[in-house]
Image (tube, rainbow, N blue to C red):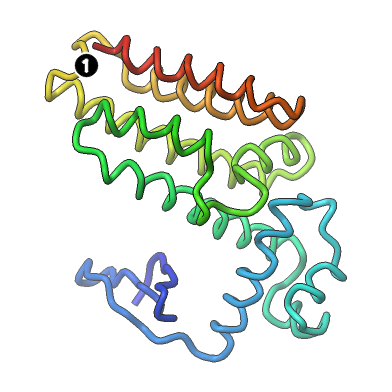
């Protein structure tokens, strides 16, 4: 077996077999369970404090493990941080897509974004949007984390563009709508709303920008 792997709620790896292209549930061994435990316990800290602000003491306190146990499963702090970002981003996207999946039309799926980011669901990562947090901290200071944030952005953009293209195909949106540019605009508005709201402590700014997000989506018709 080879390829990417995900952790299921039952504690199994969901692994893609390259030979068959089927997903196979493979039970985690002790080392994998410990590694996953460290990721889950440290992910909220990295998302709240950032890479620079998270210390080894933070990680050992959160996990209840010794320095040797943490670094026996990860080469260094950077490797923990990269895995934590993956965990946080997967959690964030799962929360958003779960809400979108409950909507029937492509327009409704896009409009659902405003509700999610105005009032974050309980299963959203502690500390807010991992993409915004990481992009701000890692720019010009941590290339590996910056690349992780870039990958996350590209994936989000691709997903939103696919929804917009589906809306064009179903005649919910105009034929001349540029799906990729619109997806980038929506992401920029959403992330900007989060940033301004956090900076000022004024939730009213977020509501104002989310209204602009709604208008952008409505105007696609």
Q: Which residue is mark 1?
A: 173
Q: Residue at horizontal 55%, vertical 60%? A: 87
Residue situated in front as seen by the camera: 215 or 31: 215
Res 220 quadrant in image:
top left
Give the structural element (helix, strand or loop) at label 1. Answer: loop
Looking at the image, residue 71 sits to the left or right of residue 194; the answer is right
**Where does residue 30 sit, x and y in percent of width and height?**
55, 91
Looking at the image, residue 146 sits to the left or right of residue 1; the answer is right
Res 75 quadrant in image:
bottom right
**Where does residue 39 sit, x and y in percent of width and height?**
63, 69
Q: In the rendered picture of this protein, how many numbered marks are placed on residues?
A: 1
**Where does residue 162 sit, x and y in percent of width and height?**
28, 33
Depicted 133 relative to depicted 194: above or below: below
Depicted 172 relative to depicted 143: above or below: above
Q: Residue at horizontal 50%, vertical 48%? A: 121
Q: Residue at horizontal 63%, vertical 37%? A: 132
Residue most toward the left?
A: 170
Q: Residue at horizontal 19%, vertical 37%? A: 104
């Amino acid at each position: 077996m080879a390829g990417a792997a995900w952790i299921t709620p039952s504690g199994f790896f969901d692994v893609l077999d390259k030979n068959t292209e089927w997903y196979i549930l493979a039970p985690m061994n002790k080392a994998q369970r410990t590694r996953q435990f460290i990721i889950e316990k440290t992910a909220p800290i990295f998302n709240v404090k950032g890479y620079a602000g998270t210390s080894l003491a933070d990680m050992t306190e959160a996990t209840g493990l010794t320095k040797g146990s943490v670094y026996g499963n990860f080469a260094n702090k950077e490797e923990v941080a990269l895995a934590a970002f993956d965990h946080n981003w997967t959690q964030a996207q799962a929360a958003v897509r779960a809400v979108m999946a409950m909507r029937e039309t492509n327009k409704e799926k896009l409009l659902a974004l405003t509700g999610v980011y105005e009032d974050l669901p309980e299963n959203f990562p502690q500390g807010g949007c991992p993409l915004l947090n990481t992009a701000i901290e890692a720019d010009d200071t941590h290339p590996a984390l910056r690349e992780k944030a870039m990958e996350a952005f590209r994936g989000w953009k691709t997903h939103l563009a696919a929804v917009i293209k589906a809306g064009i195909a179903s005649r919910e949106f105009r034929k001349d709508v540029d799906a990729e540019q619109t997806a980038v605009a929506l992401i920029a508005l959403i992330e900007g709303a989060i940033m301004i709201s956090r900076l000022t402590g004024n939730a009213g700014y977020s509501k104002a920008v989310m209204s602009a997000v709604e208008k952008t989506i409505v105007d696609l018709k």
